[in-house]
């Protein structure tokens, strides 16, 4: 399968199965904004829960936060985003489309839209933050920004959390939330959008220990993605060159995935030094030092940041899981999702719509829902077609109620990946699934 094809196939599969829809589609869509449908929201929630569980619930040294999207405008002056969060923009004098000046075609002097050569004006800086107004008067004093990263909500709450949670440095604060960037050239489906979600963690450490913590977090985050089941040969690190480093970073590594459109970042590990806390101390006039009670030392901690794009990681998960196979002479498309992430864990089918099988299957489906195992009941079409629909949706197990069920109370469980079938007693199915979900 050609790489370009895979993106087209993913866009169409995710629409067909209710994962992702274009925002405001009935009005022709909104530029590079996407909505998550019934299966998409489940997959996204499962991904975020997996991250939260690892970063917050399984550790004593990281606290959670849910800060507001709208923040005091001075936050973005202090953070350097008003001045420095820009991309170089050029305009084609022939078709008047605007592009990032660092796109390879643009650097080569050719307009990606109309193909005209050497028609670009000089680059100018374009700030990526969305502006809006707070309150009823649209004057400059009320201008505020939609946050372009969630991290700043963590910095301004650093002392609130350290004090109330009685944490000692080193410790971290984690948050998942929306971020907004008025990207000049968004695209590649949910890869680069104007509204997206980040799962970020800022780890506060004593200056001098930052290099060691950086290495630890770099390794931990790569391991986490491998643990999700992403193929290791499709993952790599990329170290930022001095030109690529963000205004706040001393050292940065991206975790990259080999997408159909090339190796691209989906998570960044950054050593932000004491840049952000020092700037907030300066701009707010409030001391943001940590006092070590044991030694009486005062210092502004350094920060190691892990910043994962939720939507981009979702694209990694989907692209990595997509397979086309021939099974018993028939083509099938399958999303081999990690069962922990899969939106539906099981589908329940009566083999035929008679002999009391729909009633038995409904009973089983209800037992699964009662145990909070997301399940789908389907009695429409041939059993083969029902399997194919669930393969595409990424459902790991299909449970079929057949003639034998009425005799001995067992159902067949078919594994999405191996296609193996086993018979399990109806009263044991919930436990059987729970055991397998816990083991992943
Ligand atoms: N707080 C640091 C920070 O925001 P970043 O490298 O600009 O660093 C971190 O962004 C992650 O956020 C990226 O690795 C990516 O996954 C995600 N991200 C950034 N811009 C995005 C966009 N326009 N659309 C989707 N995801 C984006």
Image (cartoon, rainbow, N blue to C red):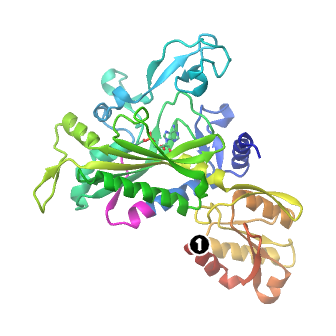
Is residue 250 shown left or right of residue 26? left
Screen quadrant of the C terminus: bottom right
Residue 109, visible in the rendered structure: yes
Expressed as whole percent of the image width and height from the top left, the position of residue 379 reads 81, 66
Q: Residue furthest left?
A: 296
Q: Quadrant of residue 79?
A: top left
* Residue 303 sits inside the magenta stretch: no
Residue 190, visible in the rendered structure: no
Q: Which residue is depicted at the point 30% across and 30% down?
A: 77
Q: Which residue is mark 1?
A: 437
Is residue 258 shown left or right of residue 326? left
Q: Which residues are magenta?
A: 54-68
Q: Is the CB of mark 1 within 8 Å of ligand 1?
A: no
Front in this rendered view, residue 174 or 233: 233
Expressed as whole percent of the image width and height from the top left, the position of residue 34 reads 60, 41
Q: Is residue 196 above or below residue 47?
A: above
Q: How many marks?
A: 1
């Amino acid at each position: 399968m050609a790489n370009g094809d895979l993106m087209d196939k993913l866009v169409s599969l995710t629409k067909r199965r209710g994962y992702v829809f274009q925002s405001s589609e009935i009005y022709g869509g909104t530029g590079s904004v996407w909505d998550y449908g019934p299966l998409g929201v489940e997959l996204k929630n499962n991904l975020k829960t997996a991250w939260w569980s690892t970063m917050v619930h399984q550790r004593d040294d990281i606290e959670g936060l849910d800060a507001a999207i709208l923040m005091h405008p001075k936050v973005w002056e202090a953070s350097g985003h008003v001045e420095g969060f820009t991309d170089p923009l050029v305009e084609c004098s022939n078709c008047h489309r605007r592009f990032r000046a660092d796109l390879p075609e643009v650097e080569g002097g050719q307009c990606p839209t109309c193909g005209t050569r050497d028609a670009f004006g000089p680059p100018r800086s374009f700030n990526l933050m969305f502006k809006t107004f707070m309150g009823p008067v649209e004057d400059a004093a009320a201008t505020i920004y939609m946050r372009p990263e969630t991290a700043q909500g963590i910095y301004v709450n650093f002392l609130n959390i350290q004090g109330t949670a009685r944490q000692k440095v080193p410790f971290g604060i984690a948050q998942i939330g929306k971020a907004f960037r008025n990207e000049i050239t968004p695209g590649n489906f949910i890869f680069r959008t104007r509204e997206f979600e980040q799962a970020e963690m800022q780890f506060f450490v004593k200056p001098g220990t930052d290099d060691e913590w950086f290495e630890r977090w770099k390794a931990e985050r790569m391991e986490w993605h491998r643990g999700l089941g992403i193929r290791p040969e499709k993952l790599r690190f990329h170290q930022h060159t001095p030109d690529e480093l963000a205004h706040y970073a001393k050292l940065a590594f991206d975790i990259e995935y080999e997408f159909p459109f090339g190796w691209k970042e989906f998570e960044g590990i950054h050593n932000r030094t004491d840049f952000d806390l020092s700037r907030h101390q300066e701009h707010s006039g409030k001391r943001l030092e940590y006092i070590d009670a044991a030694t009486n030392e005062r210092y502004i901690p350094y920060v190691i940041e892990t910043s994962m794009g939720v939507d981009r990681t979702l694209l990694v998960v989907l692209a990595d899981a997509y397979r086309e196979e021939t099974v018993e002479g028939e083509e099938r498309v399958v999303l081999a999702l990690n069962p922990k992430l899969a939106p539906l864990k099981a589908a329940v089918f009566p083999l035929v719509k008679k002999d009391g099988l729909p009633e038995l299957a409904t009973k089983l489906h209800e037992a699964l829902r009662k145990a909070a195992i997301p399940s789908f009941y389907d009695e429409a079409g041939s059993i083969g077609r029902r399997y194919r629909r669930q393969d595409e949706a990424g459902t790991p197990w299909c449970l079929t109620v057949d003639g034998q069920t009425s005799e001995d109370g067992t159902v067949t469980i078919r594994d999405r990946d191996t296609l193996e079938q086993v018979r399990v007693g109806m009263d044991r199915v919930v436990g059987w699934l729970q055991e397998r979900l816990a083991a992943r």
